[in-house]
Image (spheres, rainbow, N blue to C red):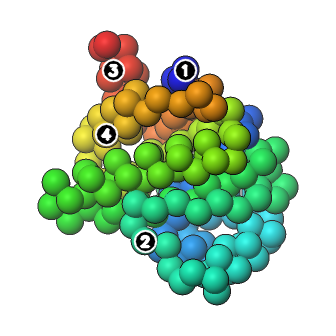
């Protein structure tokens, strides 16, 4: 899979699937979640509510999909990142699961291009450098015959610098 890095608002990126850093309620929140629901319109929340009614809350590290409403993408993949609590081992595993499960779901949906935000590095306070290392490692280790391109979108300069450094270093 090809890996690209870009900076900006995820709702403006062209990709088959946009990944949302959701919370377990799936009922919307701030940050990137708020931006996706605002730009995508009410249909996404309606579908999230249906998922809730069907299967309850989304567990940390898992992923579910909806259509993308007014966004140009085909799908929004909602994954729930861990809230950083200093348990590095457990939080790292859960964050890795977010990337892995989102990619697995993307494959099952025949997604060719997917864009990820920097999951958990906002209000969930996951250390940015560690989060980036995990994200890049999971993507590099995931072998896919379906997904062709993964885009990391950074919203803040700090994350962009970290990703640049890590992606350039090998
Ligand atoms: P979490 O609760 O998983 O920490 P946040 O939405 O608070 O989720 O933050 C996750 C990351 O998304 C942060 O790095 C934040 O800067 C970034 N972010 C916020 N808004 C957007 C946006 N519109 N597009 C892309 N990334 C965004």
Q: Which residue is mark 1?
A: 2
**Structural distance between the alpha carbons of marks 1 and 3:** 17 Å
Please give left or right for residue 105 compared with residue 74 in the image: left
The Cα atoms of the two marked residues, 1 and 2, are separated by: 29 Å
What residue is rendered at 15% in x and 61% in y? Answer: 87
On the picture, is 68 further left or further right than 6?
A: right
Counting residues from the start of the chain, the first of labels 2 and 4 encountered is 2
Residue that badge 4 annotates: 134
* Image depth: mark 3 or mark 2 in front: 2
| Residues at marks 3 and 4, CA–CA distance in whole angstroms | 14 Å
The foreground one among 142 and 168 is 142
Residue 44 to residue 168: above or below = below
- The mark found on residue 38 in the picture is none
- Among the two numbered marks 4 and 1 on one chain, the one whose residue lies closer to the N terminus: 1
Q: Tell me if mark 4 has few (under 14), some (14-19) or many (20+) residues whose alpha carbon lies within 10 angstroms of its own.
A: some
Residue 59, numbered label: 2
Describe the element under mark 4 as helix, strand or loop: helix
Q: Are marks 3 and 4 in contact (CB under 8 Å)?
A: no
Q: Which residue is mark 3?
A: 165
Relative height, residue 46 to residue 101 (above, below): below
Instruction: Give the image location of residue 138, x and y in percent.
Output: 37, 37
Residue 156 is situated, as x and y percent measured from the top left of the image, at 46, 40
Instruction: Choose the circle earlier in sequence order: 1 or 3.
Output: 1
């Amino acid at each position: 899979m090809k890996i690209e890095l870009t900076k900006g608002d995820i709702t403006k990126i062209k990709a088959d699937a946009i990944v949302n850093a959701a919370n377990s309620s799936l009922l919307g929140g701030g940050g990137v979640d708020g931006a996706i629901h605002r730009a995508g319109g009410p249909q996404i929340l309606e579908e999230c509510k249906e998922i809730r009614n069907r299967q309850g809350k989304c567990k940390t590290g898992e992923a579910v999909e909806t259509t993308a409403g007014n966004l140009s993408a085909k799908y929004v993949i909602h994954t729930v990142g861990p809230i950083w609590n200093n348990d590095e081992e457990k939080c790292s595993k859960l964050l890795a699961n977010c990337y892995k499960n989102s990619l697995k779901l993307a494959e099952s949906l025949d997604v060719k291009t997917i864009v990820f935000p920097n999951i958990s590095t906002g209000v969930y306070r996951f250390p940015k450098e560690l989060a980036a290392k995990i994200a890049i490692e999971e993507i590099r280790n995931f072998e896919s015959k379906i997904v062709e391109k993964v885009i990391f979108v950074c919203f803040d300069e700090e994350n962009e610098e970290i990703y640049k450094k890590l992606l350039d270093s090998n």
